[in-house]
Amino acid sequence: MNKIVLTFGFLSGALSSVMMLATVPFMDRIGFDHGVVVGYTAMVISFLFVFFGVRAYREQAAGGTLTFGRAFTVGLLITLISCVCYVVTWEIIYFKIWPGFFDKYSAYAIEKARAAGKSQQAIDEVAQQMRTFKGMYDRPLINAALSFLEPLPVGLLVTLVSAAVLRRKG
């Protein structure tokens, strides 16, 4: 199980990391709204390795049979490895490649509130919220924890679906 989990976990993580690094140079053109769509689409694509990893485990290590619990465990381990790769890549991007990310994002959020016709009080609240978030994101451990929570729900969903589809009784 270890070899399969590690292989597919790092393949998923590598794909996620490469797609994240590939989109960063185009974020000014893509925009933050479309960037979220691109980012989560990339996550779903990278988490396809969870499905393939669970299937490989069933066929190679489990002799063609697999319970839901074991399939979920294998998928979860692959997901966790992929999420760690995602976090490491984001930390590098945030602190080294694009250190002004949160300033640009804050300006975008404030302008979006303004364009939506929000009151000055609501705009001020958005600005305060952005300052609070920036303070959190500027701390590497908190940044890592918050970043880990971005791909995790997607990975868990793919893991649940994979475990349900790929379970096979003997």
Image (spheres, helix red, strand yellow):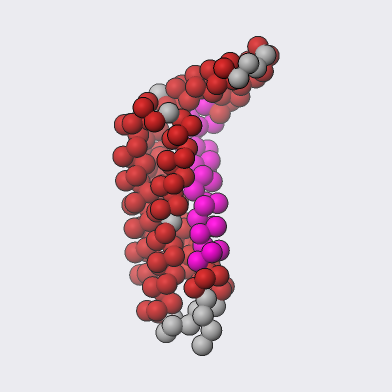
> Residue 53's spot in the image, x, y percent?
40, 67
- The answer to whether any part of residue 144 appears in the image is no
Q: At which x and y percent is residue 146?
A: 53, 41
In this orientation, which residue lies closer to the viewer: 3 or 42? 42
Residue 156, located in which quarter of the rendered image?
bottom right
Which secondary structure type mostly characterizes the magenta part of the structure?
A: helix
Tell me the quarter of the picture where residue 11 sits: bottom left
Question: In front here: 22 or 79?
Answer: 22
Q: Residue at 40% across / 66% down in the picture?
A: 52
Residue occupying the far top of the picture: 120
Rendered view: 143 above or below 69? above
Is 161 situated above or below 114?
below
Residue 102 can be seen in this image: yes
The image shows residue 65 at horizontal and vertical percentages of: 48, 82
| Residue positioned 47% across, 40% down in the render | 37
Residue under the point 55% across and 51% down:
153
Residue 60 lies within the magenta run: no
Q: Position of residue 154 (x, y in %)?
A: 52, 52
Quadrant location of the N terminus?
A: bottom left
Tell me, yes or no, whether the highlighted magenta stretch contains residue 161.
Answer: yes
Q: Find the magenta span and give its range.
A: 134-162
Closest to the observer: 168 or 101? 168
* Residue at x-position 40% and y-position 38%: 91
